[in-house]
Amino acid sequence: MMSGALRDEYRPGSKGIEQMNILAISGSLRAASSNTVLLRAMVNLVPDGVQISLYERLADIPPFNPDLDGDDVAEAVKDFRLQLQEADGVLISSPEYAHGVPGVLKNALDWDVSSGGLYRKPLALIYASPRGTYAQAALTEILNTMSARIVPEASATIELMGKKPDEINAYLSTPEMTAILVGAIEIFISAIQTLCTTQASLN
């Protein structure tokens, strides 16, 4: 079954299609997070018919508790699950803390295990530093376990360590960096369309 905007009427490459929705999740709560700035830059680079929405309620999600994982979960959990389910694809940009995935991001993903919002969902990983290899490996393992469809060709690493938000915005606006981000977005959109076609042929 296709999710989000990729319903029966969707035809890859056609005109007048229903909008493709991509959910972007930053694994950092810092106001000046380079991961968040990176995702915000990508929001403005999508073509017509595609929208990237930045998820901004990670801090509202309560600590995961299996005893509370039922029909009456917290409103923030319901909202997170709904946004995942309605998204046609997901972008995640996460820092590394203590050689691991930030607790707030892992906590949010734990809440999705039972609801399956990431099941067979196209997903790309966008990193703001090449040094977070432990977190990259851990996050990849988590997402594979949840049966997300990671698209390596659409994943990218941009070196932003040590730069302030204004410097990051200026750097990401250069022709070279814009080309890298646009290229990643285009590959990701194509992967979503391919999955849509594949799933439609199986239904």
Image: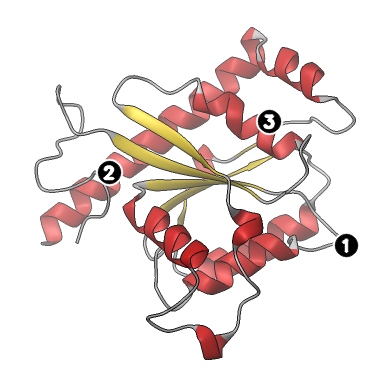
Q: Is residue 46 above or below residue 6?
A: above
Instruction: Look at the image and tell me in which quarter the C terminus lies.
Output: bottom left
Residue linked to disc 3: 37
Label 1 residue SS: loop
Residue 116: image location, x then y, percent: 39, 70
Residue found at the far bottom of this picture: 67
Q: Position of residue 135 (x, y in %)?
A: 75, 58
Q: Quadrant of residue 70?
A: bottom left
Q: Position of residue 151 (x, y in %)?
A: 48, 48
| Scheme by which the image is coloured | secondary structure
Q: Amino acid at mark 2?
A: Thr
Distance CA(mark 3)–CA(mark 2): 29 Å
Residue 3 falls left or right of residue 190: left
Vertical placement of 77 versus 26: above or below? below
Q: Nearer the viewer, mark 3 or mark 1?
A: 3
Question: Vertically, is 40 above or below 69?
Answer: above
Residue hosting label 2: 194
Specify few, some or many for label 2: CA neighbours under 10 Å numbering under 14, 14-19, or 20 or more.
Answer: few
Q: Nearer the viewer, residue 127 or 85?
A: 85
Residue pictured at 88% horizontal, 62% vertical: 98
Which numbered disc flags the more N-terminal residue, 1 or 2?
1
